[in-house]
Image (tube, rainbow, N blue to C red):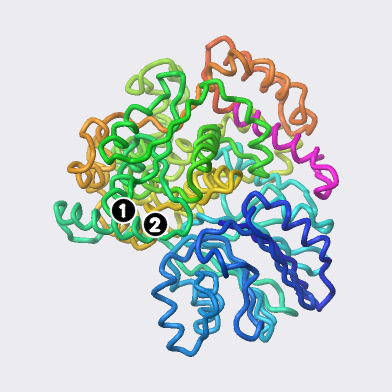
Amino acid sequence: MCGIAGIVDLKGKREVSRALLSRMNQTQVHRGPDAGGLHFEPGVGLGHRRLSIIDLATGQQPLANEDGSVVVVFNGEIYNYQALIPELTQLGHVFRTKSDTEVIVHAWEAWGEACVERFRGMFAFALWDRNRETLFLARDRLGVKPLYYALLGDGQLVFGSELKALAVHPGFARELDPLAIEDYFAFGYIPDPRTVYRMARKLAPGHTLTVRRGASVPAPREYWDVRFTLDNPIGEADAQAELVERLRESVRLRMISEVPLGAFLSGGVDSSAVVATMAGVSEQPVNTCSISFSDPAYDESAYARRVAERYRTRHFVDNVDSDDFGLVDALARIYDEPYADSSAIPTYRVCQLARRHVTVALSGDGGDESFGGYRRYRFHTMEERLRSMLPLSVRRPAFGLLGRVYPKADWAPQVFRAKTTFQALARSSVEAYFHTASILSNEMRGRLYSNAFKAELGGYNAAEVFHGHAARAGTEDALGLVQYLDFKTYLVGDINTKVDRASMAHSLEVREPLMDHPLVEWLASLPSSLKVRGNESKRLLKKAMEPQLPHDLLYRRKMGFAVPLARWFRGPLRSRVRDALLDGRLAETGWFNSAYLAQLLAQHDSGVREHSHALWTLLMFDAFLRNAMEAGETASPLKVAV
C-alpha cells in the first residue's frame, strides 16, 4: 500500500517547488515507509511513498511508460494485472517491470479513460499524460482507497491520499464547511464527496476526474455503480454453491504477495468465512490476528480461537484493556477530519498487532452491506411492511402525533419502545432510515446548534445526502434501497475510512475479498429473501458456510468491535468530556448551544438518558479542532469563526 501526492499547474507551466512537494509527500510516510519518489516536469510534480508488496525489486514509483510521456503514482492493488499484461503486450506495449503499476500506464495508452473499467482491485491513482497535457485521477468502485483533491485559487490542482498532504500547501485554505459539520453530527463521518474543508473534495468511489491544462475543471465522471436488480432466478442451493466458488476466487486473487500475508479474525461470520476460504486455497498455514478484551461483555476471542484451531492457523492474540481510551488524540491526527466510530480504537489495535507478523492482511469488511448483516436492516424491512399498508399522507399526521405524545423509554426492550416505532411509521422510507442511521437525530441537532451556525447552514439538512442517493438507487425494494444507501455512505465514509487510516498508521495493507466488485454485482442481483428472512440475517452466507464453520458461531448474536462508551463517560472520561464540551475548542467556536451541551452531560451522568454516542461524537469533534489548530507550521491556518 502507498501514499500519493501531487501538484499540477492547470493554467501554465510554472515551476513546482521540490521542497513543498517533498513536505506533502512526507506527511504520508506512514503509508509507505519503504521508499519515496518524486517526478517533476514543467508545471507538474508527482510524489509517492511506497509500501513494497509486489515486484519488490523494480516497482518503484512514480513510474513511466517507455518514452516517459505518461507517468503514474498509484495506491492500491490491481488484482487482475497478470491477465492484462499479455493483452497489452499483444497491443505492442513493452513492460520493464512485473508490477501492477505499469499495467496502469499502458492501459491508459490503450483504452484511455475506460482503462479503469478493466481493473479489478482497490486503487486510487493519478496519471499525467504530457502529450495530451492531461491529469487523470481515478478511484476504485467501492472506495477502499482514498483520494482527496482541491483546486487552488491560483489555478493549481493538488491531490493526496490524505487531507494532511493538501493542508501543507500554503494556497490551501483550511476553512471549515458548515454543511460537512452538519453531515458529521448526523452520520459520525463526512460522506463523499464532501470534506471538512470547503476547498477540498474526495473523489467519490467509482469515479474518475479528467482535467486538461488550460480548460476548466469538469465534474467527476461515474464509471460504475452497484445495481440491486434482484432478478437472478437462481435457486438457494445453487446460490450457496456459487457463492463458495466466488469467495474462493476473490480470496485467491488477494493472496498474491511477495511479503508475509495473513488475516484479521474477529470471531464473526465474515472474517471467519474469509479465513476458512483462505485455508482452503493455501498450502501453508494461514496467519490470523485477533484481539481479546478484558471485559467479557465485549470479547469474541473464544470464537476466533475455535476457527483458528479448526484450520490450524498461526494465531496471534493481543489483549486490549476495555478502558483503552488513550487513543482519542491519536485518532484525530490519523483521520484528519472529524470521525466518530469508536470501533476505530480496537481496529487500530488489531492493525498494530497484525503488522508485527504480516505486511498484508485480509479482512471481512463489506460483508454486512452485501449479505444484509446489520440488525437495522431487519427492523427497517419490518417497518417498511407496516408503512406499505397506509399512504404517507395518512401515516405522517396520525403516527406523528402518537410519536410526540408517547413517553420515551430508552431503558425498555426494543419491543416496548413504541415511541420510536410510531416516529418511524410517520416517516417516508428514506427519512426513517436516515433517522435510524443518525448519531444525533434532527431534533437533537436542532437543539445542539447555535442560531449563528443554523444561519450558516441556510436550511441544509444532512438527510439530503440520503435523498440524493435514493433518487439514483434504481430500486424500490426495502432491503435493496437501504443496502444501496449504505454502499454510497456508511461503507465508504465509515468502514473503509476506518480501516484505511488505522492500517496505514501501521504501514499495513488490508485487502477486502468481500468487496470484490464482481461478487458485489452478483449478490446485488439476488432476491432479498436470500439475504434477510424474518429475524435471520446473512442467510445465504451462513447457509453456504455451514459445512466449514461451527453452527453456534454462524447463528449467534452479532457483536462487532464495541467499546464501553457509556461507562467511560460516567467514569474515567467524565472530566475529559465535560471539559471538551463546556470549556474546550468546541465551546469556543460559537457554533453550539452551551445549555444543551450541559443538558446532554447531566442526563447521561444521571442515567436518565443514554447519550454516549452523541458525547463521543462531540468529544471527537473537539479532538479534531485541537489537532487542526495545533498543526502549526505543517498546515495552513484553520478558519473556524462563524
**Quadrant of res 313:** top left
Taking 500 as reference, is 5 above or below it?
below
Q: Which residue is mark 2?
A: 255
Tell me the magenta residue range.
616-642
Q: Is residue 291 magenta?
A: no
Residues 366 and 467: in front is: 366
Q: Is residue 340 left or right of residue 16?
A: left
Q: Are marks 1 and 2 in contact (CB under 8 Å)?
A: yes
**Quadrant of res 9:** bottom right
**Quadrant of res 105:** bottom right
> Magenta part mainly helix, strand or loop?
helix
Label 1 neighbour load within 10 Å: few <14, some 14-19, many 20+: few
Residue appearing at x 59%, y 18% in the figure: 569
x%, y% of residue 499? 52, 45
Give the mark nearer the N terminus: 1 vs 2: 2
Quadrant including the N terminus:
bottom right
